[in-house]
Image: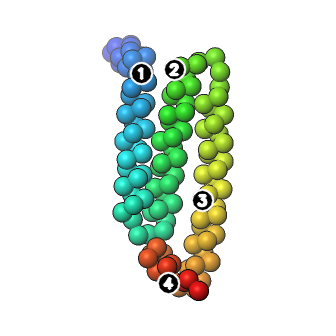
Amino acid sequence: MSNLILSFFKDFVLNVGLTHFLCLAAVLFCIGFIGLISSRNFIRVLMSLEILLNAVNINFIAFSAYCDPNEIRGQVFAIFIMAISAAEAALGLAILLSFFRKKPTVDVEEFRSLKG
């Protein structure tokens, strides 16, 4: 029984193609984009940006693995994007904390009233 399950998973993993990764990345990108334009909460906006960047990472790694498997250019770009997204999250949370000291809210629309 366990050999049958193991062979099923091996066949399933080996049959995953570039199209599957591109569809997953497209779904993640759409979810992130909809969350980005529809959310008023600053933390949700940051999370949506992270989802967008993760979709881009999936595309880079999938194209690198399927189009040029001997090179690691896609993986290198993905690592740079992860570093940029970590810096973006840290900077975004620092900005959120400084705004939160002025007005105790995380609503993005309230930040517009801080213009001087």
Nearer the observer, 15 or 33: 33
The dot on residue 66 is: 2
Which of labels 4 and 1 is toward the front?
Answer: 4
In-image side of 109 versus 74 (left or right): left
The number of numbered discs placed on residues in the rendered structure image is: 4
Separation of marks 2 and 4 at Cα, in angstroms:
49 Å
Taking the spot 56% from the left edge, 83% from the top edge, the residue there is 115
Taking the spot 60% from the left edge, 30% from the top edge, the residue there is 74
Q: What residue type is labelled 3?
A: Ala
Separation of marks 1 and 2 at Cα, in angstroms:
8 Å
Separation of marks 4 and 1 at Cα, in angstroms:
49 Å
Label 2: few (<14), some (14–19) or many (≥20) C-alpha neighbours in 10 Å: few
**Where does label 1 land, which residue?**
17
Are dots 2 and 4 in contact, CB under 8 Å?
no
- Mark 4 or mark 3: name the one nearer the start of the chain: 3
Q: What residue type is labelled 4?
A: Ser
Spot occupied by residue 80 in the image (x, y as percentages of width and height): 66, 42
- Mark 4 or mark 1: name the one nearer the start of the chain: 1
Image quadrant containing the C terminus: bottom right
The dot on residue 113 is: 4
